[in-house]
Image (tube, helix red, strand yellow):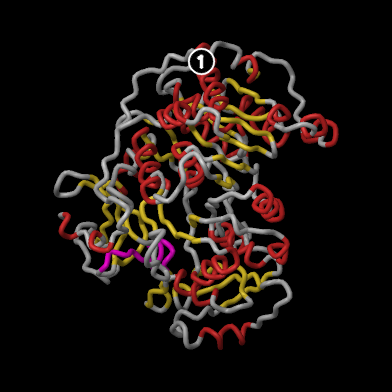
Amino acid sequence: MTESNYLWLDDYPEKTDWNMEIDVQPVFNMLRETVSKYPQNPAFDFLGKKYNWQEIYDLSCKMSKGLQEHGIKKGDRIGLFLPNCPYFIISYFAILMSGGIVVNLNPLYANDELSHLIEDSELDLVITLDLKILYVKMEKMLQSTRLKELVICPFTEVLPFPKNILFPLVKRKEMARIRPQKRVISYNDLINNDGNVQIPDINPEEDLAVLQYTGGTTGLPKAAMLTHQNIYANTCQAQEWFYDIEIGAQKMLGVLPFFHVFAMTAVMNFSVINALEIIALPRFDLGEALKVIDKKKPHLFPAVPAIYSAINASPLRNKYDLSSIEFCLSGGAPLPAQVKEEFENKTGCIVIEGYGLTESSPVACANPIEGKNKTGSIGFPLPRTIIEIINADDKKTHMKAGERGELCIRGPQVMKGYWNNPEASADVLRKCDDGGVRLHTGDVAIMDEQGYVFIVDRLKDMIITNGYNVYPRNVEEAIYKHPSVEECIVAGLPDANRGEIVKAWIKIMDGRELSHDDLRAFLKDKISPMEIPRRIEFRDEPLPKTMIGKLSKKDILAQEQGV
């Protein structure tokens, strides 16, 4: 595939250079560059306690030296078992400067899941908080896995006055009782040094920065090996795309968890490279998020569609001023057109739908911030990114404009492979005729004649009913058009006669009513008879979601099966 076949180039955003040069740099150079230019600029606001970039950098250097003095060397894996808080960004860059590899751990994982990740990534050290909900899990891991040590960070020390005094009194039951032992290291002891860290030689294109586990829909999670260059390049690509950002002058709302690849790049690292102030919440709470937007006036608000949908449906939104928000990047799941339009109308901001995977660090496509956003499209490839629509059967033939095929990605953000899993790596990373490597995503897509990409569905999610292919996303889009629908998941269920049948789980908006017959009548002129759900389940409670607020098809199917 030559540049003459890149359909997107003729209509590419005028202020964005697809052929941009991307330096080869270790990830921590973003922080070093920012602190050299904006040392006193606000960097992090956690529940009212603020840090500037010099403070974040100095603490990272001290922690990095402490890790090295403790024996951490280049290539060692270190786990982060933390919510959004100052310790996350400090530890993240400390690990990278010491030559270590960050392993992001989801605090909501069950013990068996954590045990698998610790053993699989060969973790010996994890950094966490002195909160019971976190420490108790990690203490069990010390007893039952290869994990050797914990670094414990004091939660009250990152709270502002008087919260730092009141929290251990009012929330005493939430604090962990930590017995003195050799295997538990104090954060304050670790940073008790001059911060003169000796950064090892890093080959950004070969050396790993992060092991990022994919949730997956089946089987055990796999760890995408993301190099320094993968993450640095993707952050630079995002910076080029959002060219209107005022470097050193704007604020980023961080409600998505940093341990997730979307927030790691699009919230944390994007803020670092642009010297934006991160307003961080430890978790998403609708009421708290609206208060923070009203009071602290962030300009950027990356989120998943379910969060925008929740704001649309909430009566609380009219109590708060959301007009400070200029740009929203939606990712993690398909963005229903209805949700995008309603949120933009209510706030006056621009909602940009992007697309990516853990394996691409993660962003590969995005809609332009100016010009045409085609309904249902994930936009154009990011700079230096090649999107190819490949025949899903032979894995080689390029499909023509408008033809369905598997979406494949080539670019500097594509992972090195899966950790300790050469078979899975070979399955998704395939060599091209020109010697390059193509990431096969498993997503069904088309590209139109202007280069806009449209996701049709997941290959694995496609429902085959009576031999007819049904794409759940198409059905969900149609259902979302009904004004009474707040949330919707569509999936296939086994059926003896048809192979599979289409089922929809729907959360109705508060105060609204909707019947099975009314919904089927509404859908009659919007989708084919084979696509109309044969089973519909209405729920009063929100549908299950992942940690970042993405509607979880995996969990809804587990509930259906009584797992």
Query: What percent of the width, then of the height, locates residue 323?
Result: 60, 59
Which residue has dot 1 on it?
65
Instruction: Look at the image and tell me in which quarter the C terminus lies.
Output: bottom right
Please tell me which residue lies in front, 79 or 530.
79
Amino acid carrying mark 1 in the image: Lys
Residue found at the far right of this picture: 169
Residue under the image location 60 percent in, 47 percent down: 255
Residue 458 is covered by the magenta coloring: yes
Instruction: Look at the image and tell me in which quarter the N terminus lies.
Output: bottom left
- Relative to 234, say whether 152 is above or below: above
Please tell me which residue lies in front, 371 or 525.
371
Let me know if residue 269 appears in the view.
Answer: no
Query: What percent of the width, then of the height, locates residue 282?
Result: 65, 42
Query: What percent of the width, then of the height, locates residue 313?
Result: 66, 67
The quarter of the displayed image where residue 209 is located: top left
The quarter of the displayed image where residue 89 is located: top right
Please tell me which residue lies in front, 545 or 320.
320
Q: Residues within 10 Å of mark 1 (few under 14, many from 20)?
A: many
Residue 102 is covered by the magenta coloring: no
- Relative to 472, say whether 439 is above or below: above
- Relative to 429, say whether 185 is above or below: above
Residue under the image location 71 percent in, 27 percent down: 157
Magenta residue span: 450-462
Please tell me which residue lies in front, 362 or 31.
31
Let me know if residue 437 appears in the view.
Answer: yes
Query: What percent of the width, then of the height, locates residue 220?
Result: 48, 45
Q: Is residue 284 left or right of residue 266?
A: right
The quarter of the displayed image where residue 535 is located: bottom right
Q: Is residue 54 left or right of residue 211?
A: right
Residue under the image location 52 percent in, 36 percent down: 104
